[in-house]
């Protein structure tokens, strides 16, 4: 069974997904970060594939992309780093990236490699759903990969239900119509959006991202969904001085257990 499916079958609440950019802060930090996240209790690892124009991301993640590319990170290099990860990493691993680098690598070669090394799912923010359904869904299914679509407060109910129909992993609920890391905390307006989506009784699990940074915002987001995704706030943790592994573990445990 796909590990994403297994996770949501076994656990329905307080799921914590953590995003970081591959190759940041240093080129070879990928596996150290992954090990530390799993040991600290993260439920999903979401690895960003660096791209020169990450339009959906705020300045913190944009800067991490720039640093990672300067460090020499590429999709080919990332796959090499992940080659034997399933000897030590047991939780679901998702790659998040833009369409252009995947196209350059070759979509089928990309999917095949993901299956070989144990990647469970993909998030491609600039992949249109119709193109996915017509060109790639059969391929994703063949290689046992789960594709994740994003919704926002501006997404119509009709569109949300269409996304729900064609989702086979989880739905990424963007908490606000802005770039990642633009603001922290959860507003009353966002809670209204969370409540309205919850009331739709969708079949797919939902994780809330953008603006989740601490224990309080994680708990509040998890009240209205199956859990939350933290990105920009975790990138900032990786920038802290001191022992990176201990910094990661302290942060993750604080999110989950404060």
Image: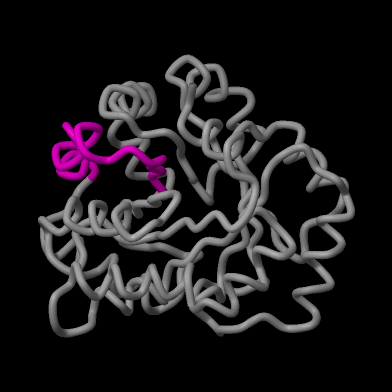
Q: Is residue 109 left or right of residue 197?
A: left
Residue 212 position, x and y percent, is: 54, 73
Q: Quadrant of residue 62?
A: bottom left
Residue 31 position, x and y percent, is: 18, 50
Q: Is residue 203 left or right of residue 250?
A: right
Q: Between residue 98 and residue 47, name the one nearer to us.
A: 47
Q: Between residue 123 and residue 168, name the one nearer to us.
A: 168
Indicate whether 126 appears above or below 7.
below
Residue 183 position, x and y percent, is: 56, 84
Q: Is residue 93 left or right of residue 70?
A: right
Q: Is residue 83 magenta?
A: yes
Residue at x-position 46% and y-position 68%: 57
Q: Quadrant of residue 48?
A: bottom left
Residue at x-position 42% and y-position 33%: 120
Q: How many marks?
A: 0
Q: Which residues are magenta?
A: 75-96
Residue 145 position, x and y percent, is: 47, 28
Q: Between residue 255 and residue 231, name the one nearer to us.
A: 255
Indicate whether 93 appears above or below 151.
above
Residue at x-position 85% and y-position 45%: 201
Q: Is residue 92 magenta?
A: yes
Residue at x-position 32% and y-position 79%: 236
* Colour setting: one colour
């Amino acid at each position: 069974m796909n590990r994403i499916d297994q996770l949501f079958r076994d656990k329905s609440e307080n799921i914590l997904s953590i995003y970081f950019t591959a190759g940041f802060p240093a080129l070879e930090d990928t596996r150290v970060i992954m090990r530390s996240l799993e040991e600290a209790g993260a439920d999903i690892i979401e690895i960003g594939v660096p791209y020169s124009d990450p339009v959906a991301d705020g300045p913190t993640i944009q800067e991490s992309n720039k640093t990672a590319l300067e460090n020499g990170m590429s999709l080919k290099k990332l796959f090499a780093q992940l080659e034997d990860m399933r000897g030590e990493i047991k939780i679901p691993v998702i790659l998040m990236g833009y369409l252009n680098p995947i196209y350059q690598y070759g979509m089928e070669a990309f999917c095949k490699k993901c299956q070989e090394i144990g990647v469970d799912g993909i998030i491609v923010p600039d992949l249109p759903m119709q193109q996915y359904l017509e060109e790639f869904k059969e391929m994703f299914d063949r290689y046992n990969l789960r594709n994740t679509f994003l919704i926002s407060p501006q997404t119509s109910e009709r569109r949300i239900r269409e996304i729900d129909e064609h989702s086979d992993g989880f739905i990424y609920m963007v908490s606000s119509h802005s770039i990642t890391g633009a603001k922290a905390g959860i507003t009353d307006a966002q809670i209204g959006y969370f409540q309205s989506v919850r009331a739709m009784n969708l079949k797919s699990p939902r994780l809330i991202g953008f603006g989740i940074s601490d224990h309080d915002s994680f708990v509040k987001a998890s009240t209205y969904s199956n859990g939350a995704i933290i990105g920009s706030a975790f990138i900032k943790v990786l920038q802290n001085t001191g022992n990176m592994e201990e910094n990661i573990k302290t942060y993750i445990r604080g999110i989950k257990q404060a």
